[in-house]
Image (spheres, rainbow, N blue to C red):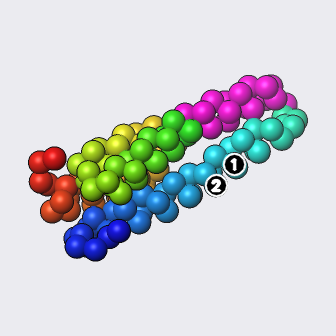
Amino acid sequence: MMEGLSTEARIGEILLAIGIVLSFIALAYLILYGALPFSTRFFPTHLIAGYLHAVALVKCVGILTAITGLFSARRLRFQKAGILAVIATLLPPIDIVFFLAGLLLLASPEGRKPS
């Protein structure tokens, strides 16, 4: 699967997979924390839960983008995988692991070759 690839491409692909796992953990946290009943004096409960669920929805889009990037990396299309990883970084909440993976995939010798 990863025979003959440069070190940057291997590390970028591994970081992309690790970032997806960490994003699923963060997504579960956002959904579960948004479902908890809050009792504060200053903010209504439904606004806090609605905000957390909206962030979780955007996080789902980022995870789907990163999964698409991982599939592209597995098909040896490293330019597309790097660009998708950087796009997944820009979706809030910002995920630095996707950014590092995207930079490594784009900086690898395989990523510099035209597809």
In the image, residue 54 lies in the stretch drawn in magenta: yes
Where residue 5 appears, as percent x and y from the top left, is 24, 70
Residue identifier under label 2: 25
Q: Is residue 34 left or right of residue 90?
A: right
Of residues 76 and 82, which is closer to you in this image?
Answer: 76
Q: Which mark is residue 81?
A: none
Element class at badge 2: helix
Query: Which residue appears at 32% of the width and 54% of the height?
Result: 75
Q: From the viewer's perspective, is 99 left or right of 18?
A: left
The magenta span reads 41-58
Q: If the image is split into quadrants, where does the N terminus sit?
A: bottom left
Instruction: Between residue 49 and residue 110, name the one nearer to us.
Output: 110
Q: How far apart in space, not on screen, are marks 1 and 2 (Cα)?
A: 5 Å
Q: How many marks?
A: 2
Q: Element under label 1?
A: helix
Residue 34 percent coordinates (x, y): 75, 38
Residue drawn at x 68%, y 44% is 30
Q: Quadrant of residue 68?
A: top left
**Which image quarter: residue 96?**
bottom left
Percent x, y of residue 18: 49, 62
Residue at 35% in and 43% down: 84
Q: Amino acid at mark 2?
A: Ile
Inspect this view and state whether residue 82 appears.
Answer: no
Q: Are marks 1 and 2 in contact (CB under 8 Å)?
A: yes
Q: Residue at x 83, y 41 (%)?
A: 36
Q: Is residue 44 left or right of residue 72?
A: right
Residue at numbered disc 1: 28
Q: Residues within 10 Å of mark 2 (few under 14, many from 20)?
A: few
How many neighbours does mark 1 have within 10 angstroms: few (below 14), some (14-19), or many (20 or more)? few
Inspect the image, locate mark 1, and give the three-letter code of the amino acid beneath it.
Ala
